[in-house]
């Protein structure tokens, strides 16, 4: 069976450094940090008092107030990003065969704030179970694509992938295969997360995963830097409209890039720590290249998982050197988490969008906040430090890894 070609025709982004696709890109190339003191709750007793929150965002500017009240933030974010991507793709919703349009979404946690608030409210009471009737529908991770499909009437495959921070990259790979195999003409895919909450911050602090650089939040996310001390939590959503190439071509769609392959693997090593030798990461990048039918020397740019953790950054770069050999030094490597923080289940989507836009504009966004060399990192690697670099990108890769040892990798190519 010959696989169908898949292209990206629409993009939507809601991020800590920009609330639209264009704002996000401007934030990326200018090296903007999205980190700032948390405004959502009192952080006095928390180890980490900052995060990458959305700025100047009000869900009711986009969603009916009553409907918005029935959604957790992660679903609100999904709706806004998906709306932008669908509008950007200029889909003629009324004329489409909606049975062949899917929504495949990623979320690592889902409605964490809803769960937190409902349980705290119960704990304050007299033991009588008074819960909001929308508690469960707001909380469950699959509700975001459900709401997107309800709004537009899309009746194809509809589900959420949950693989921690690899969730939206998993979703994109599933969406790619749904079109490749002829099951769909169009899939709306991506991911969203809204974990900047008491429970989210408290939980990640308890496992010593977060930076505690409270005196300088804007410099706290510093992938590959010798003084990095943990990741910075972010929130938001990224959405892509994928279409079968001939379908997109027939309707005269604008095409950003061709989605040429993906890969999955497992570390099978530890609940939260990466394998020190990057075995699973090596496997996922090799799987991705094989799936796309490419050689290592074909890749021009890699947006790394690059969370700014002491172990993870080193393991990933060692894996890149292993897979790409001498060509590794010719690749523009970066970590946009230095600017957006770590969006958990939405990370794969917004970072894939960065790769696609970098390809379109011929500019690789920087890895900001680098001041100190890490002796465990190969100095010959081009980590695109502190300043954007011009680059003609024909093939770009995005890596995303999650707690539990989940690894996902996706590849995009400039359309011939």
Image (spheres, rainbow, N blue to C red):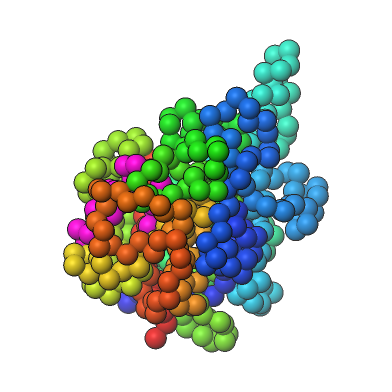
Does 152 appear above or below 165? below
Does 165 appear above or below 91? above
Q: How far across and how far down the image is residue 42, in percent? A: 67, 30
**What residue is drawn where x is 69% and y is 21%?**
122
Where the C terminus falls, by quadrant? bottom left
- Can you tell which quarter of the image residue 402 is in? top left
Please state which of residues 119 and 41 is positioned toward the viewer in this rendering: 41
The segment highlighted magenta reads 304-323
- Can you tell which quarter of the image residue 252 is in? bottom right
**What residue is drawn where x is 21% and y is 46%?**
277
Q: Is residue 236 magenta?
A: no
Does 58 appear above or below 355? above
**What residue is drawn where x is 62% and y is 60%?**
18
Q: Is residue 321 magenta?
A: yes
Check the image and name the residue furthest to the front. Answer: 371
Check the image and name the residue furthest to the right. Answer: 65
Q: How far across and how far down the image is residue 395, in percent? A: 36, 74
Please state which of residues 74 and 377 is positioned toward the viewer in this rendering: 377
Please state which of residues 148 and 269 is positioned toward the viewer in this rendering: 269
Check the image and name the residue furthest to the top. Answer: 126
Q: How far across and how far down the image is residue 203, in percent? A: 50, 30
**What residue is drawn where x is 47% and y is 27%?**
206
- Can you tell which quarter of the image residue 194 is in? top right
Is residue 112 visible in the rendered structure shown here? no
Is residue 56 visible in the rendered structure shown here? yes
Q: Main secondary structure of the magenta part?
A: helix
Please state which of residues 24 and 287 is positioned toward the viewer in this rendering: 24
């Amino acid at each position: 069976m010959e696989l169908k070609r898949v292209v990206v025709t629409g993009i939507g982004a809601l991020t800590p450094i920009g609330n639209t696709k264009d704002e996000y890109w401007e934030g990326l190339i200018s090296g903007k940090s999205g980190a700032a003191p948390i405004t959502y709750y009192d952080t006095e007793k928390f180890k980490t008092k900052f995060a990458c929150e959305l700025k100047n965002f009000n869900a009711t500017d986009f969603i009916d107030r009553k409907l918005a009240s029935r959604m957790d933030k992660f679903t609100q974010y999904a709706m806004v990003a998906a709306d932008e991507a669908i509008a950007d793709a200029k889909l003629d919703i009324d004329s489409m065969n909606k049975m062949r349009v899917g929504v495949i979404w990623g979320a690592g946690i889902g409605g964490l704030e809803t769960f937190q608030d409902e349980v705290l409210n119960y704990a304050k009471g007299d033991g009588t179970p008074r819960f909001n009737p929308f508690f469960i529908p707001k909380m469950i991770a699959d509700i975001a694509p459900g709401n997107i499909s309800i709004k537009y009437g899309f009746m194809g495959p509809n589900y959420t992938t949950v693989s921690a921070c690899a969730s939206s990259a998993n979703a994109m790979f599933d969406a790619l295969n749904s079109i490749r195999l002829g099951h769909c003409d169009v899939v709306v895919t991506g991911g969203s997360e809204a974990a900047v909450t008491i429970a989210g911050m408290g939980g990640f602090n308890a496992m010593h995963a977060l930076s505690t650089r409270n005196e300088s939040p804007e410099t706290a996310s510093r992938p590959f830097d010798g003084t990095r001390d943990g990741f910075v939590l972010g929130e938001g959503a990224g959405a892509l409209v994928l279409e079968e190439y001939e379908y997109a071509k027939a309707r005269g769609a604008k095409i950003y890039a061709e989605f040429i392959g993906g890969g999955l693997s497992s570390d099978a090593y530890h609940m939260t720590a990466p394998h020190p030798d990057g075995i699973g990461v090596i496997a996922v990048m090799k799987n991705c290249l094989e799936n796309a039918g490419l050689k290592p020397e074909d890749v021009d740019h890699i947006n790394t998982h690059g969370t700014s953790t002491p172990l993870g950054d080193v393991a990933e770069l060692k894996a890149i050197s292993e897979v790409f050999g001498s060509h590794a030094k010719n690749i523009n490597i970066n970590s946009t988490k230095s600017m957006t923080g770590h969006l958990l289940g939405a990370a794969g989507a917004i970072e894939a969008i960065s790769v696609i836009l970098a390809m379109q504009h011929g500019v690789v966004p920087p890895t900001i906040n680098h001041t100190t060399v890490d002796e465990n990192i190969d100095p010959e690697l081009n980590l695109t430090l502190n300043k954007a670099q011009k680059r003609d990108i024909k093939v770009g890769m995005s890596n995303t890894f999650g707690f539990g040892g989940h690894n996902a990798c996706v590849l995009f190519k400039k359309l011939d």
